[in-house]
Amino acid sequence: MSQSVLVIDDETNIRRMIHLALVHAGYAVQTASDGLEGLEKFGKGSEYDLVLLDQRMPGMPGIEVQREIFRRNRDARLILITAFGTIDLALEAIKSGASDFLRKPFTAETLRLAVKSALERPAAHLSAVPVGMVCREFTRTAINGFSFELDNQATDEAVGDLTCVFDVHRSDQPTQQVRVILPAYVMELVRAYTDSEQVPGGQRFWTAMCEESLANHLWQNAEVPPENVLRIEDLSSSMQRWLDSVMTVSVNE
């Protein structure tokens, strides 16, 4: 029996594209044009293996629909679809049970890989971990079908640059190793931006910054960095928002 997917999205063209792509891949697909219709079709959730849920819809917002889905069935698997990804949204979505994210616009292939990855993961309540930092959760989360985990890290004693090596996974593809380089001068930019010589969590903070940078690249590009190397050159607006958020969140292990 084919696996069943419920798509809740107010954009007709998006619903049609998702429906066609997933039916072509062998899934049974039902669609809903808003949160209320989606919840009516979802019922107790026993008929569906996965829900694809748009974050921004008129009427009932996606995050409220998500909470109700997990209230009804804590074993539900859910991919949150959004073009408006922010730190706060990610934290709220993770706290409410989501384990996967898909960023608009996306290709049919990215969609199929994200769905396959989500269906292979344990149910939300079995894989849930306490929310400490968004970036830590991203390493346990599928982003456009990718997930990743830290393999090793090292600091260049001569210049102070930190290099973190991550194993990046995606369904139907070999694991790739990606190096994220955080130069010492960018660490100084962080200290100046936060007006603090001491960052919370010590070394863990800098590792988390590398995690966040890789997560953001996968979010924006749906592919690993060129030549599997990502160098953090400055403090982008998204990184500044991340810093504003995590300076008030514990990064202790």
Image (spheres, grey):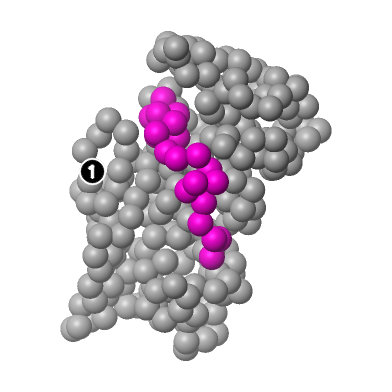
- Whether residue 89 sits left or right of residue 109 in the image: it is right
Q: Main secondary structure of the magenta part?
A: helix
Q: Residue at x 21, y 38 (%)?
A: 174
Asked if residue 60 is among those painted magenta in the image, a careful observer would answer no
Q: Nearer the viewer, residue 110 or 119?
A: 119
Asked if residue 127 is among those painted magenta in the image, a careful observer would answer yes
Q: Residue at x 60, y 15 (%)?
A: 30
Q: Give the secondary structure at mark 1.
A: strand
Residue 244, placed above or below residue 76? below
Residue position for label 1: 175
- Whether residue 238 sits left or right of residue 25 in the image: it is right
The stretch of residues the image draws in magenta is: 112-132
Residue 38, placed above or below residue 59? above
Quadrant placement of the N terminus: top left
Percent across and percent down for residue 13 are 60, 18
Q: Residue at x 54, y 28 (%)?
A: 50
